[in-house]
Structure formats: structure tokens, C-alpha cells
Image (tube, rainbow, N blue to C red):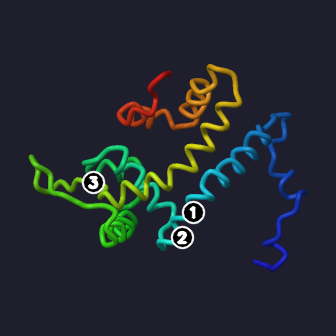
Amino acid sequence: MAAHDKNVNIADINSALPSGGETLPLDIMGLFFFAYRDFTGDADALLGRQDFGRAHHRVLYFVNLRPGMPVADLLDILKITKQSLARVLRQLIDNGYVEQKTGHSDRRQRLLFATEKGRQFFRTLSATQASRIDAAISSLPPDSRRIVTRFLVGMVDPDDRNVLDRLNLTTGL
């Protein structure tokens, strides 16, 4: 690839847009980018101090949301490989944020629990994110939380919506 092929300019972007008059929700897409950037930014800084990244945050989120979650369920939710999860999980366990226990009925099953250190770190990570969400929703009309939730559920692949229900993420719809 030539050096000039790596550069992208506005003409390249515009030529990639659909041609038949379709409109893309570029405004929503751009806002989604900025909202996600800022939503994750504060947590990223805290994670970085522990030499952790977003994968660690996702694991901490679900382990705190569902104590005793089997590793297999976490793999299914995160849609990552065992190898990827093993590296992240090993760091969280070695640093005292997560503990792994054997299943009661199936000794092959590995169940994940946040330690007190992991619960506290999760609360710290979640505080700024929760305040961003609360501030944004509080500036909207009264029924907006339900509408925002419905919008976000609509963004999730239909095959994964049952997972949202199992995790109680769609209550109040």
C-alpha cells in the first residue's frame, strides 16, 4: 500500500456513502461516538492506573451485576474467546478484584464473584458514568428514561435481547 493510500479525506468518505438518496443518521452516529468517548473516558483513566483496560471493566461490570456468573455465560455475553477472557480474568484474580469458585452441582463449572476490592473499584468506576447518565436523563421530559432504554434495546442484536431480560436490563419497558 502506498503512503498516500493510508490517508483519508472527505471525498473518500463521501464516495463511500450510499448513492440512491438514502440518508444515514450521521448526526446520531457522531453523537454516539462522542457520548461513548466521554462515557468511557473517566473510567479509562481509573482503569489505566491499575494497568487495566475496558475488557477488565466489562468483566467487573458483569461479575458485579451477577455474582456467581459462570465463566461460560460471561464468554457468551462478551462474545470473546476463552483465551482473551483468561488473560483479563487472570489479572483481575491475581490483583484481588475477582475470585473464582467451583460450581456446586457441576465441579467443572467456574463461578465468578467480585471481592470487596472488586466491588469497591466497580462502584468507583460506575459513579461518574452513572452521574453522566442521570444528568442527561434528568434534563429530558419525564418518560425519557423508558424511551432511551427502548432505543438502546433496539440497538442490540435481536438474538441477544433475551440476555438483556435475564440480566434485568430491560425492566421498566
Q: Is residue 58 above or below residue 158?
A: below
Q: Is residue 44 above or below residue 169?
A: below
**Which residue shows up at 67% across the image and 53% down it?**
38
Task: Name the amino acid type tagged 3.
Answer: Phe
Label 2, on which residue? 48
**Which residue shows up at 84% across the image and 35% down it?**
20
Label 1, on which residue? 44
Q: Nearer the viewer, residue 13 or 26?
A: 26
Q: CA distance from mark 2 to mark 1?
A: 6 Å
For this view, does 119 lie left or right of residue 54?
left
Q: What is the x, y in percent for residue 87?
A: 37, 70
Q: Residue furthest right?
A: 11
Q: Residues within 10 Å of mark 3 (few under 14, many from 20)?
A: many
Q: What is the x, y in percent for residue 74?
A: 35, 51
Dot 3 falls on a residue whose secondary structure is strand
**Which residue shows up at 81% across the image and 35% down it?**
23
Mark before the other along the chain sequence, 1 or 3: 1
Mark before the other along the chain sequence, 3 or 2: 2
Are dots 2 and 1 in contact, CB under 8 Å? yes
